[in-house]
Amino acid sequence: MKTLEESAVMAMDGVDKELFPFLPYILQDIWEIGADPDAIIRLIGNYFEKCAGLKVLDLGCGKGAVSVKLAHTLGCACYGIDAIPEFIAFARQKAGEFKVDHLCAFATGDIREKVGDLTGYDIVILGAIGPVFGDYFETLTILGKCLNENGIVIIDDGHIDDDSDYSHPLMVKKSVLLQQIDQAGMELAENDVMDRDEIKDADDLIFNNLKKRCFELIEKHPDKENLFLDYIKKQEIENDVLENKVVSTTMVIKKKLIEK
């Protein structure tokens, strides 16, 4: 099992755990780090007639953009957890700015440890953090225990087309993804595929800010130059993957109906 630091860096598309303490500085210009809050708001509206008061668990919540916007727009009660204390502090600040601090609670911690004690949620969100819990079977088996009977899981992730010869260490082909969802006793209810041009625009904005901050860190920590240059290169590679080689999607997954 990866350490908390390794897992957090992996979620930010890094590989070296030495990067962990520098992530708040590198990502200081970006609030919406992972999933698109607007897409998630739209999808939730498709599955619940009344959204106010829905209990939302936002795992790997980053700086809280999804939770804060869900609370502000839909009136959901959100609980977000992330490994990086500075991100959680920022999330609390934004909840205050949006006047939803009565609806949003945030905590620092390891989601792999905390999730076992969390139940009764209408929605569980994994917003672009990668396979922190394992493959889809393992992930959904764990997250299913957090859900109410009619609850849904929303996962922002990428998969590979079945007819593609491309392979990625953290992504599977769609047929494998569907098989693992089925094995977990769940089904894919909706698959909102992201537009590649929109992905590129978002990637470019994040990358330009990230690159600028990495070069500032090189000035401050010249002995760690390779650490930051490697992270820039890794981001370039991952952006190419997301923009050209895989299908990026926001999925709604729910438990299968059991016939009585």
Image: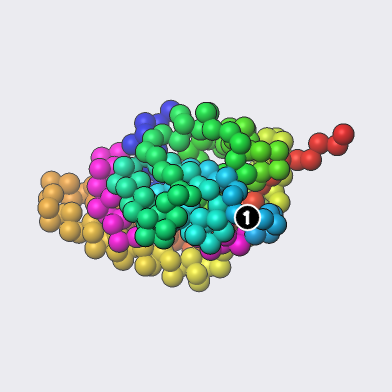
Which residue is denoted by mark 1 in the rendering?
51
Q: Quadrant of the C terminus?
A: top right
Q: Residue at x 33, y 42 (%)?
A: 84
Q: Residue at x 50, y 47 (%)?
A: 78
Instruction: Look at the magenta stretch and give its main secondary structure.
Output: helix
Query: Residue 147 or 142: which is nearer the viewer?
Result: 147
Query: Residue 169 or 251: which is nearer the viewer?
Result: 251
Residue 75 sits inside the magenta stretch: no
For the view shown, which residue lies furthest in the right direction? 260
What amino acid is at disc 1? Cys
| Residue 210 percent across, percent down from the top left | 30, 59
Give the side of residue 211 with respect to residue 60, left or right.
Answer: left
What color scheme is it? rainbow
Bounds of the magenta segment: 17-44
Residue 20 sits inside the magenta stretch: yes
Check the image and report above or below for 131 versus 99.
Answer: above
**Residue 161 placement: quadrant:** bottom right
Q: Residue at x 43, y 66 (%)?
A: 202
| Residue 95 percent across, percent down from the top left | 40, 54
